[in-house]
Amino acid sequence: MNFSKFASRFDSQSGIVQLMDDLGNAMSGNSDALMLGGGNPSHIPGVQQYFRDSLHRLIENPTLFAHAVGNYELPQGNQEFINAIVELMNKQYQWGIKVENVALTIGSQSAFFFLFNMLGGEDETGIHKQILLPMTPEYIGYSDVEIQKLKRTFDWMKSPIPENQLETQRRNFGYYFRAHDERRGTDFCATFPELEEFYRKCLEIKI
């Protein structure tokens, strides 16, 4: 079956798919691995007990339970929870935020999807805005969130590069790895013998 281009983004090896696959494999079975990142919730006994008690209160209250499983919330999210967030943020950090400054999502992926596509991409005037976010080591999961990013990247890869820019980039490549070898005591040609001829030519470029 041929899916849309939008769907193919999620069918391929996107950043979040690879990240969650790694996390799932690491925590499956009887592994002694310690999860130190990836956003995986920590197993804190006190916090888990609080969640457990809250679920019991929800189940034992017919009105709250019926609302939780049978009613839609506002598009912004649960109003009572939003009010609590506003109160906490203002008390803790003196931000001075209001209810209209808070929106609830099902997680960071959903939140970043909305933010990236609200603030990045093509606007009504035709201007393309980009989101600059370091992908490693912490944000690989958000690398494919902006819908128009892959199209811009593909268009850039297809666009011709002026010869003078290519010469500059090749020269910079050679100078960078020569300086790297001097600092680290490494040997680029020994590590990448298949690139030795290209590397030598880059060092010969005079601009």
Image (tube, rainbow, N blue to C red):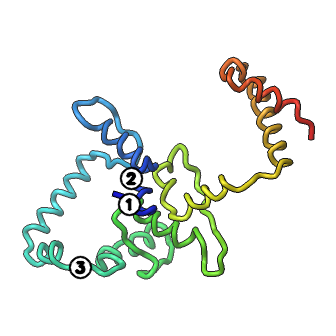
Q: CA distance from mark 1 to mark 2?
A: 9 Å
Tally the numbered discs. Answer: 3
Q: Are marks 1 and 2 in contact (CB under 8 Å)?
A: yes
Residue at point 55% right, 49% down? 135
Q: CA distance from mark 1 to mark 3?
A: 30 Å
**First in sequence: mark 1 vs mark 3:** 1
Mark 3, Cα crowd under 10 Å, few <14 / some 14-19 / many 20+, is few
Which residue is under mark 1?
A: 3
Instruction: Indicate the secondary structure of the residue bearing disc 3.
Output: loop
Taking the view exactly as shown, the residue that stands out farthest to the right is 207
What's the amino acid at mark 1? Phe
Residue at point 74% right, 23% down? 196
Indicate the position of residue 153 as horizontal and vertical percent values.
61, 56
Which residue is under mark 2?
A: 11
What's the amino acid at mark 3? Tyr
Mark 1, Cα crowd under 10 Å, few <14 / some 14-19 / many 20+, is few
Where 135 sits versus 204, above or below? below
Q: Quadrant of residue 19?
A: top left
What's the amino acid at mark 2? Asp
Using the image as rendered, state which of residue 82 and residue 182 is in the foreground.
182
Indicate the position of residue 130 as horizontal and vertical percent values.
62, 64
Q: CA distance from mark 2 to mark 3?
A: 30 Å
Instruction: Indicate the secondary structure of the residue bearing disc 2.
Output: helix
Which residue is under mark 3?
A: 72
Residue at point 50% right, 47% down? 138
Indicate the position of residue 136 as horizontal and vertical percent values.
55, 45
Does residue 122 appear left or right of residue 143 in this picture? right
Q: Nearer the viewer, mark 2 or mark 3?
A: 2
Where 30 sits versus 166, above or below? above
Where 19 sits versus 2, above or below? above
Q: Are marks 1 and 3 in contact (CB under 8 Å)?
A: no
Instruction: Indicate the secondary structure of the residue bearing disc 1.
Output: loop
